[in-house]
Image (tube, helix red, strand yellow):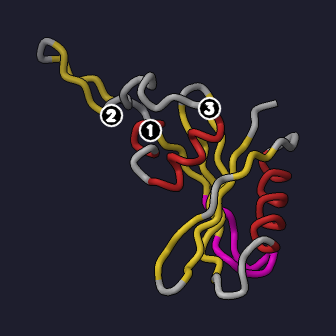
Amino acid sequence: MTPYASVALFRRDGKVTFKAPRKERPQDATQARKAAIRFWRGNLNEDDRLLKVIVLRESDGVLEISERGPGRQHDRAWVEYRSDIATAAREPHLAACIRELGISAEGAPPAMPDVLVINGVTYRRDI
């Protein structure tokens, strides 16, 4: 069972900020997302406005990230994408989640390029 980490972005006094991330240990991504939404909606101060909840996990050296804005359960869908660890570590809230999961951003391999040219032969990666 791969652990997930969640973090909430919220607006406080006109600035976007986040609290320390939280580990989620459910069986699958759907349960992790539901647990994260419930937790972060219930743990904001009165003057905070929830902007986005982010849930991520590491799989084979790549981060699987899901984001969702505020709203009712069926109002907004989760947006899912993948990112390499080094790129995600540039964002402070994602870097905090990476540290929470115990992943080292320095030891991660560089991102694979979409096009390689070796000895005049062009190789393209299927995306």
For label 2, the residue is 114
24 or 67: nearer the eye?
Answer: 24
55 or 114: nearer the eye?
Answer: 55
For label 3, the residue is 102
For label 1, the residue is 127
Disc 1 crowd, CA 10 A, few/some/many (<14, 14-19, 20+): few
Please give the count of numbered marks on the rendered protein: 3
Q: Is residue 89 left or right of residue 100?
A: left
Are the two marked residues, 1 and 3, in contact with CB atoms closer than 8 angstroms? no
Specify the farthest residue to the left: 120
Q: CA distance from mark 3 to mark 2?
A: 28 Å
User: What secondary structure predominates along the stretch shown in magenta?
Assistant: loop
Q: CA distance from mark 2 to mark 1?
A: 8 Å
Q: Which residue lies at the image location 54% right of the left edge and 34% below the top edge?
A: 62
79 or 2: nearer the eye?
Answer: 2
Disc 3 crowd, CA 10 A, few/some/many (<14, 14-19, 20+): few
5 or 48: nearer the eye?
Answer: 48
Check the image and report above or below for 79 versus 115: below
Please state the extent of the stretch shown in magenta in the rendering. 69-79
